[in-house]
Image (cartoon, rainbow, N blue to C red):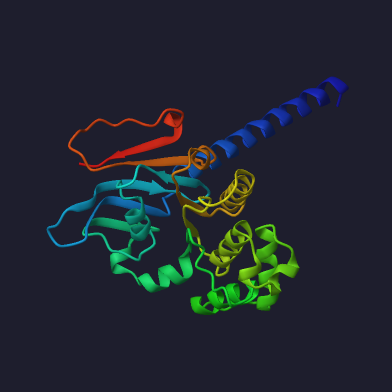
Amino acid sequence: MSNTTAIQTNTIASETSAKATTTTTTATTAATADAQPILQLCNVSYSYTRGGKKVVNNLSHDFHAGKVISITGPSGAGKTTVLSLLSGLTSPTGGRILYQGSDLAKSDRYRFRSHDIGVIFQSFNLLPALTVEENIVLSMEASGRTFDRPKHELVVDLLAKVRLPEEYANERILHLSGGEQQRVAIARALSYEPNIILADEPTGNLDMATQDDIMEIFRQLAHREGKCVIIVTHSPAVADQSDEVFELKPLRRSNTRTAQPGWSQRTTTATQQ
């Protein structure tokens, strides 16, 4: 075979390989875009008493794995109620909440809360008399999961994930700063490997540098590990570092749907009626 023919053959082979790679990439992107939401609000309403004033009315939204989603809105818009609904602590009085396509109301909600979803509280809710490791191990044991490695090794790995050195395992919670306690709270929420992380104002009491570091941890959990991270926040800086913003509006009669300036390209605004 002549050199010219060989060059032409190699060129055709390279072009074919490039087209195949492009096709695979396109297919993968399309599959990701069409992936089923891991958690869904489907026309969800909630009131504290039967027939009483609605706190949340006809909310719908899809939450996908691999993304950080901030839930924002003014006081009274129902952010805390939505967090309770998504975590399975509260059942909607109207509509449905789906986890991986199944109605939570017809599922084992205790198993959902202890296996599939990890909650990070604004006040941390750590046990101050216990050490960091004891707080994390307690959460592991409460989940009922079985682990294939010693719990101490898992704790050390979790601490590394939230950027705390191994020696912190034996520190008592009382000796930690607010930012360090928040990191431990994240490690505890991750201890039983949930698919979803819910965080209630996780950076509300932190300085800006620590806030940015915590948000970087959340982004890594979503983008590298494929978790769905949902954050309730008042902070525009936190919302700006999220992949999506789900903005709640207070209950009102108007059908106008507006997004807060600066968030328009990735903001879903839920106007409740």
Report the residue at 56% width, 75% height from top. Answer: 140
182 versus 115 height, above or below = above
Question: Residue 15, how many percent across, how many down?
Answer: 69, 28
Number of numbered discs: 0
* Residue 81, quarter of the rendered image: bottom left
Residue 101 visible in the picture: no
Question: Residue 69, how many percent across, how many down?
Answer: 46, 46
75 and 101: which is toward the camera: 75
Report the residue at 52% width, 63% height from top. Answer: 124
Q: Quadrant of the N terminus?
A: top right
Question: Residue 249, how many percent across, how many down?
Answer: 30, 40
Q: Quadrant of the C terminus?
A: top left
* Residue 101, quarter of the rendered image: bottom left
223 and 239: which is toward the camera: 239
Residue 111 visible in the picture: yes
202 versus 273 height, above or below = below
Q: Residue furthest top?
A: 4
Report the residue at 51% width, 41% height from top. Answer: 243
1 and 272: which is toward the camera: 272
* Residue 133, quarter of the rendered image: bottom right
Q: Residue furthest left?
A: 51
Question: Residue 47, how many percent across, how many down?
Answer: 21, 57
147 and 56: which is toward the camera: 56
- Relative to 114, 4 lies left or right: right
